Image (cartoon, rainbow, N blue to C red):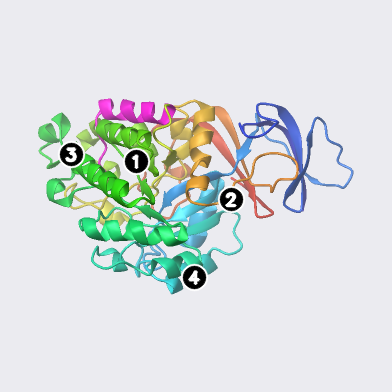
Amino acid sequence: MKIIIRGAKIIDSKSPFHNQTLDILIVDGFIKKIGKSLPNSDNAEEVKLDNLHVSQGWFDSSVSFGEPGYEDRETIENGLNTASKSGFTAIALQPNSFPIIDNQSQVNFVLNKALGFATQLFPIGALTKESDGKDMAELYDMKKAGAVAFGDYTKSLDNANLLKIALQYVQDFDGLVIAFAQDDKIKGSGVANEGIVSTQLGLKGIPNLAEELQIARNLFLLEYTGGKLHIPTISTAKSVQLIKEAKAKGLNVTCSVAVHHLVLTDSTLEGFDTRYKVSPPLRTETDRKALLKGIKDGTIDMITSDHNPIDIEHKKMEFDTAKNGTIGLESAFGALMTVLPLETIIEKLTAGKAIFSIESYSVEEGSKANLTLFNPEPLSIFTKSNILSKSKNSAFLGLEIKGKVYGILNQQKIILA
């Protein structure tokens, strides 16, 4: 494999070539040379694209596909191809399947299904057996098989002692615990953010407190046990503040925010469109601005698409009964470009690799070629024609987005959209 990427502006703060527009010669999966007007003496394939920008490959820390069990929502094959054309060279797969990824054989199954693709798949093992919150799953065995973290996706762990034991146990093998934060008793039968909009629409509300109380509890447990804790998809201003204070104390806590919480608010619910029903729910403009501030000041470590395909039978229903979730891989970059600076986006789409113990490769000579190719400028409307997923439940349909993802180069493969 020999490829020359022509005239690419390199966006990589760790690279000596950051913000320079240069050619990149790639031979057998490694960056051999970076420079101006590189000669093509070996008949290498040339890649020339309009306003081409290149960065380290992006990583998404929270992706659901469905396989095994829910292949009608998404398969691993189509999901990984979608991720490639959306700019992601690596994804962490949530245990949101049936059977749930809660043992070594299930980890092996998804890893084997993901062999040979340009986008690499890293499984997240369930924290508890069948994600039922009762008994701890086979964490060590799953870690040996290749699981990069342990959590029960959008199921919050009510049993504080079980989380305490898990945080202590995984320290023996440097494991990462993921703790989704939502107090189910306070959430009750709520389906939307508790506030003016839910009251006007007559929808049962989920107060911010449901998230914040659980985060506070989990941070107290982390302070007691030590270890590493990741809090995914936070959604409120107070959550940002709680995590900022915990980091100031020296706790080993990280967090992510979903793209839709940075771009959308609960005002979108006025049409009762279930594409906007997500967990945690879309919050207020005040929360959205606090999340953006948390991104910029470093409190929030990474951004995720929180990609969750749902089949039409479970989404096109009354708001109260529809399943939570939106797909987000295809729209992630374009939506983020409407609210954040480019270099911040690249930083937050690559920072998660270190947290999930996934090797990172800077754009420099001698490094493995692990690249995302994109153009940050074009404006367009996100439509169904942009959706590559089997499920079409996107909260971003009809939204004006900025930028275009060309594809990725990874695992000695180049995939262009």
Q: Where does label 1 land, which residue?
A: 395
Q: First in sequence: mark 1 or mark 4?
A: 4
Helix, strand or loop status at disc 3 = helix
Give the amino acid type for the residue marked by disc 4 in the picture: Asn
| Picture layout, residue 332 above or below residue 171 | above
Separation (CA) of disc 3 from disc 1:
24 Å
**SS type, badge 1:** loop
Residue 209 shows which numbered tag? 3
Question: Which region is colored magenta?
Answer: 280-296
Q: Amino acid at mark 1?
A: Ala
User: Who is closer to the viewer here, 39 or 231?
Assistant: 231
The residue to which callout 4 is attached is 108
Please say whether residue 298 is visible from this viewpoint: yes
Q: Give residue 297's position: percent from left, percent from top.
A: 42, 27
Looking at the image, which is closer to me, 161 or 333?
Answer: 161
Q: Position of residue 88 (x, y in %)?
A: 54, 46
Q: Amino acid at mark 3?
A: Leu
**Residue 239 at x, y percent in the picture:** 28, 36
The numbered mark, 3 or 1, whose residue comes first in the sequence reads 3
Marks 1/2: CA distance? 31 Å
**Eye-nearest disc, 1 or 4:** 4
